[in-house]
């Protein structure tokens, strides 16, 4: 029993160190110790632009998990040079959305549910370095765990990317990926009925003109 307890404490301590290392790496000493959950006060104009893509919905599902929405992917860079310039802003915006949700103690226990709306995502928006960096932050650095990741309107070719990059994602994160294809309205109804996600969450998603 004591050995198990020690391992848990050791794991928590390592994760806390990794969290602060990553937080200070992203935000520096000038902002790293600020209350990052106060997104509007802390975020720079560039980070606020990317919070249109990565945002905390302000909602929780029926199991008390914060809901993070990734949408409007058409705003992402489509050229390697632009990815190089914008990656830090994008990562900080993502981190801020996590901080905003994790201020809730229930979320700290139960984790996040992420809805990734891929309707406006294309192969030009994919960047391996970005995928590796965000996966590392989600798996090892941030305290609240990603409990489920719902891929909404996933294009067929996305499956090949997930297979070829499975080592980057890791087994646990891959096991939490849930792909939803087919009629968009039916998928949204399924997420509401089967996964307890409030209908209001979907109001901010990128919707096609014919819905």
Image (cartoon, grey):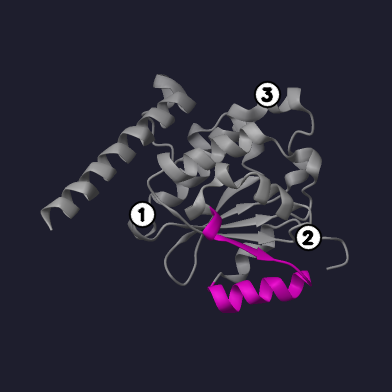
Q: Find numbered disc 3 in the image and state the secondary structure of the residue it sits on.
A: helix
Position in image of residue 161 (x %, y %): 70, 47
What residue is rendered at 38% in x and 36% in y?
A: 19
Residue located beneath label 3 in the image? 84
Q: Residue at x 25, y 39 (%)?
A: 13
> Which one is nearer the viewer's eye here, 199 or 112?
112
Residue at 42% x, 66% y is 64
For marks 2 and 3, the one nearer the N-term is: 3
In the rendered image, residue 98, in percent from the top left (x then y), is placed at 48, 46
Q: Position of residue 145 (x, y in %)?
A: 42, 52
Find numbered disc 2 in the image and state the secondary structure of the residue it sits on. Answer: loop
Residue that sits furthest to the bottom in the current view = 193
**Which labelled disc corresponds to residue 97?**
none
Looking at the image, which residue is at 75% across and 61% down? 153
Q: Is residue 4 above or below residue 194?
A: above
Magenta: predominant secondary structure element?
helix
Q: Quadrant of the C terminus?
A: bottom right
Give the magenta-colored segment's residue range.
Answer: 174-196
Instruction: Give residue 42's position: percent from left, percent from top.
Output: 49, 32
Residue ID for mark 2:
207
Marks counted in the figure total: 3
The residue that disc 1 covers is 108
The answer to whether residue 178 shows anywhere in this view is: yes
């Amino acid at each position: 029993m004591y050995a198990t307890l020690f391992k848990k404490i050791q794991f928590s301590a390592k994760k806390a160190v990794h969290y602060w290392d990553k937080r200070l790496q992203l935000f520096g000493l000038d902002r790293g110790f600020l209350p990052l959950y106060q997104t509007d006060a802390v975020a720079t104009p560039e980070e606020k632009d990317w919070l249109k893509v990565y945002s905390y919905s302000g909602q929780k599902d029926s199991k008390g998990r914060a809901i993070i929405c990734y949408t409007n992917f058409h705003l992402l860079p489509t050229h390697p040079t632009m990815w190089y310039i914008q990656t830090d802003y994008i990562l900080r915006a993502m981190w801020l959305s996590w901080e905003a949700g994790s201020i809730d103690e229930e979320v700290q226990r139960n984790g996040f549910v992420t809805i990734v709306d891929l309707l406006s995502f294309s192969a030009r928006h994919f960047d391996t370095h970005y995928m590796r960096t965000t996966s590392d932050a989600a798996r090892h650095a941030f305290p609240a765990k990603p409990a489920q990741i719902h891929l909404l309107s996933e294009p067929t070719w996305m499956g090949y990317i997930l297979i070829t990059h499975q080592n980057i994602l890791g087994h646990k994160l891959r096991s939490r990926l849930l792909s939803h294809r087919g009629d968009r309205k039916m998928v949204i109804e399924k997420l509401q009925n089967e996964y307890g996600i409030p209908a209001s969450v979907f109001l901010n998603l990128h919707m096609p003109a014919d819905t």
